[in-house]
Structures are given as C-alpha cells and as structure tokens.
Image (cartoon, rainbow, N blue to C red):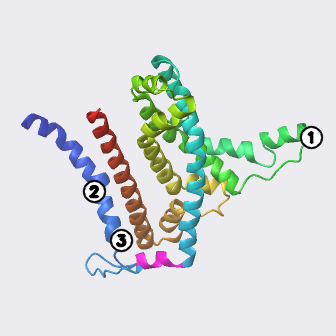
C-alpha cells in the first residue's frame, strides 16, 4: 500500500498544481474587486451581478440559442447515424465508430479553417453554385456558418453515447416485439427509442455544454461579431484584462457544466439499475 502511495504522490502534486490551485485562484478573483492585493482583499458579489446586465444576458441568450440549434440538428443526424451503425455486425460497428471519431483527432483550429475555405465567398461551395448557374450565397459571418462549425465539432459526441445505448439493447427484446405483432416502426418507438433515451440525454448534454463553451469556432466563422460565453471569458482575460469578471463568468459556466454532468450521471445510474432489474 505504501508503495502505491509513493507512486501516486507525484500525480497528486501535479494535479494540485495544474487543477486545484488555478481553480482556487479563479474562485478568489470572482469574489474580489479588481486591483486588490492578497494582503488587503475586498470581497464582493458585483462580478456576478454584472452578468445580469442586458449586454451579457444577450450573450447568454445567443449562446443558448446557437447551442440548442446545433444540438437539435446533431440529435437528428446523430441518432440516424448511430442507429444505422448499430444495424451492422459488431466488427463493422467498431470500424464505423472509428471513422466517426477520426475528425476528433484533428485540431479544432484546422477543422475551422477548413470550413472557412468551404463557406467563404470564393470558397468551394460558392464555386460549385456558380458552375451550376446558381447565385453564390454569403455564408461566412452568419448563424449558419457558426452552427455548421459547431455541428462538425460536436457531432461525434452525440453519435457515440446514442450508439452505445442502442448497442446495449438486448436483441431478444426486439425479437419479442416482432413476435407480439409490432411492426418495425412500433418496435423502434416502444423498444429501441425508449431504451436509448439515456444515451440521447448524455449526447444532448455533452454537445450542448461543448457548443456553448467553445470560443474558436464563433470567433473565426462569426468574424468576431459573435460573442458567446466562451468568447466572453476569453475576451475578459486576454483583451479587457478584467480577470475578476472573467472568473465569475467561468464559475457560472462551470456550474452549468456540473449541473449537466449531474443529469448525465443520474440517467446513467437509472440505466444501470434498469439493466440490473432485467
């Protein structure tokens, strides 16, 4: 036991330095005023109250709006893709899931620049439209560009949990449904869809949290005119230099993420209990 403790000790020290200490500093900054020294700290809630101002409420509303649009589109296409993959044999499913995750191996910045080359006025899509005799469209720096970038970035996080839930469904339940006279649609709605709900919830929460916290995609595809929660935090720390308000916003985003993780954990627990009962 002592041997294992000595082995874990360096990792604990490293975790404290790169996780615990920065988190404590963020909490400290969020509850203090700008320019305070550690000797004479003045605590305040003004940093959190500032988020209630209309300009920042608009940022939250815009973040949730684009996040929900992206999640809904990912849910539709992600479920169809996950269901389609689950129809193959196990070895083929593993290969297809690998193909789904391959884009995640590429840096987000590179993927975003790829979308710029596709959606720009002189990009590939507009060139194809011109060749087809159609009028080129302005797609960059719009909601459409930002949503497309978000979807390409978060779609795998929707497909994987849904596919995992569908894959865990006992095949005998589907066979029993058909034996009892249910057609394909009824079997899908009452068996497959119902039993894959935990995966859907997990996928929705993961993709929503990722979509509202990102800052690279809205900044590049939105041309700097899209200020989401992630961009707001980045702007406060790097451009404005208001670490106190940036820390308070980070705390709020962290709370949102923690709530989402709690919901995901609850559904995972319920799914495990259902499997144990069966």
Q: Which residue is mark 2?
A: 20
Q: Earlier in the sequence, mark 2 or mark 1?
A: 2
Secondary element type, mark 1? loop
Q: Which residue is mark 1?
A: 133
Q: Nearer the viewer, residue 102 or 247?
A: 102
If the image is split into quadrants, where does the C terminus sit? top left
Q: Are the two marked residues, 2 and 1, in contact with CB atoms closer than 8 angstroms?
A: no
Secondary element type, mark 3? helix
Q: For marks 2 and 1, give the CA distance.
A: 58 Å
Q: Is residue 48 magenta?
A: yes
Q: Nearer the viewer, residue 44 or 13?
A: 44
Q: Which residue is mark 3?
A: 29
Q: Earlier in the sequence, mark 2 or mark 3?
A: 2
Q: Are the two marked residues, 1 and 3, in contact with CB atoms closer than 8 angstroms?
A: no
Q: For marks 2 and 3, give the CA distance.
A: 14 Å
Residue 114 found in image quarter: top right
Q: Is residue 80 magenta?
A: no
Please state which of the two labelled residues, at mark 2 or mark 1, is closer to the viewer. Answer: 1
Specify few, some or many for label 3: CA neighbours under 10 Å numbering under 14, 14-19, or 20 or more: many
Q: Nearer the viewer, residue 204 or 138?
A: 204
Magenta-tinted stretch: 47-53
Residue 7 position in % (x across, y down): 16, 37
Q: Residue at x 66, y 64 (%)?
A: 225
Q: Residue at x 27, y 56 (%)?
A: 20
| Residue 102 visible (yes or no) | no
If the image is split into quadrants, where does the N terminus sit? top left
| Residue 55 visible (yes or no) | yes
Q: Is residue 134 above or below residue 241?
A: above
């Amino acid at each position: 036991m002592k041997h294992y403790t000595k082995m874990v000790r360096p990792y604990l020290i490293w975790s404290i330095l790169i996780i615990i200490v920065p988190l404590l500093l963020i909490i400290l900054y969020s509850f203090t005023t700008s320019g305070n020294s550690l000797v004479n700290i003045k605590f305040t809630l003004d940093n959190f109250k500032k988020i209630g101002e209309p300009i920042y409420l608009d940022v939250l509303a815009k973040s949730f709006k684009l996040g929900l649009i992206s999640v809904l589109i990912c849910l539709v296409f992600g479920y169809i893709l996950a269901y389609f993959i689950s129809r193959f044999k196990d070895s083929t499913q593993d290969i297809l899931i690998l193909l789904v995750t391959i884009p995640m191996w590429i840096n987000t910045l590179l993927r975003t620049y790829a979308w710029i080359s596709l959606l720009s006025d002189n990009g590939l899509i507009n060139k194809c439209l011109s060749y087809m005799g159609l009028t080129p469209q302005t797609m960059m720096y719009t909601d459409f560009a930002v949503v497309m970038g978000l979807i390409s970035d978060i779609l795998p996080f929707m497909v994987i949990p849904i596919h995992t839930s569908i894959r865990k469904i006992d095949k005998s339940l589907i066979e029993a449904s058909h034996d009892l006279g249910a057609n394909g649609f009824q079997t899908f709605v009452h068996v497959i869809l119902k039993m894959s709900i935990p995966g859907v919830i997990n996928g929705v929460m993961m993709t929503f949290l990722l979509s509202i916290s990102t800052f690279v995609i809205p900044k590049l595809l939105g041309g700097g005119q899209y200020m989401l929660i992630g961009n707001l935090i980045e702007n406060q720390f790097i451009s404005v230099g208001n670490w106190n308000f940036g820390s308070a916003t980070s705390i709020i985003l962290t709370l949102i993420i923690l709530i989402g993780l709690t919901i995901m954990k609850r559904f995972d627990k319920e799914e495990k209990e259902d499997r144990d009962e069966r």
